[in-house]
Amino acid sequence: MTDSSVSDSQLQNSLSQQTNSQSEDTISIPQIDNGDANDHYLIRLYYKYIHPAHPFLLPQRIYQENPNVFPNHLKRAICFISSYHSASDTEQLRDASNTVFSPGITNDGFKVQSLILVTLASYARFERDRGNQALSTAINIAHQIGLNSDAFHQDHEPLFRESWRRTWWELCTISGLISLISGTNIRLSQPVSITLPCDTEAYDIYQVPRIGDVKEIQQRFRLKAPAQWSSFAYKIESYAFYLWFWMQIAKGALPQNSRQKPPS
């Protein structure tokens, strides 16, 4: 697998000239082969059945216009989790998805995305050890590369930056859900002041309006001009409440059966 640089002007064409960035910086995107027809079929299934519930990968049209935008390990993870919606050999695809654990895979946002998908698929298969390995690795890499900050890859196109933010928030909500169902400790701290995801329908047509952060959504009833919060943003708010609640119990501030609400 080799790397090539794709200029922002080229990305503008890929985005159908719907973004406003005029940067001349470059973005390094791994180049891979276009894959076979089964790969494309499984990736279409991913966007049909999985993306609506976990909308953090780049929109489908970006992949359709440039299949090389996704590195090979991410394609393998997508095909693995999508195989449950097809007659494909799930076990073979599971083995192929192990590529993401290879030492030669660069620690970047795409790797975090692959690990999230492997986490979801592994827990769905009751493979808790593999799921924990993928989740722990994803969390470590996310902190290492600064994915939990709006400053992450400021030189990238707005659509890419939105995808990275969505990846961070998906990681937060998935880790919270797993801690809830497995009875394990929460692995991520209180969400930081990073912009919340916009509406998924807008995102999928390359529109990325800023809608605010966790603090703003929690104070939405006091705002004179309330924002239009996305369903993804409300999911994150639920995670923030869940995290606050269990932190209070851990500190002994609330009884186990408390129904007290967090302060606004």
Image (tube, rainbow, N blue to C red):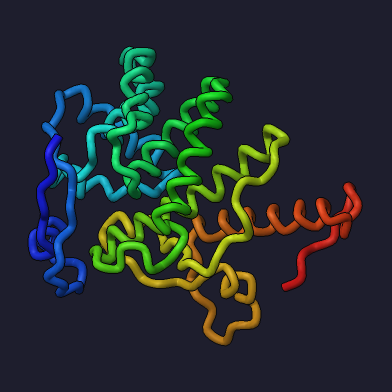
Between 262 and 187, the one lying in front of the other is: 187
Q: Position of residue 52 (x, y in %)?
A: 41, 44
* Between 127 and 3, the one nearer to me in the picture: 3
Q: Is residue 226 toward the left or the right of residue 255 in the image?
A: left
Residue 130 shows up from this direction? yes
Q: Position of residue 237 (x, y in %)?
A: 61, 60
Residue 202 visible here: no
Image point (28%, 66%), residue name? 158
Question: Residue 33, relative to residue 138: is it above or below?
Answer: above
In percent of the image, x 52 and y 29: which residue is there? 131
Instruction: Report x, y in % for residue 204.
Output: 30, 54
Question: In this view, which residue lies farthest toward the bottom?
Answer: 224
Q: Horizontally, is 205 left or right of 126 in the view?
A: left
Q: Nearer the viewer, residue 10 or 229?
A: 10
Which residue occupies 38% across, 23% down? 85
Image quarter where the C terminus lies is bottom right
Q: Residue at x 40, y 72 (%)?
A: 210
**Residue 248 placement, left or right of 148:** right
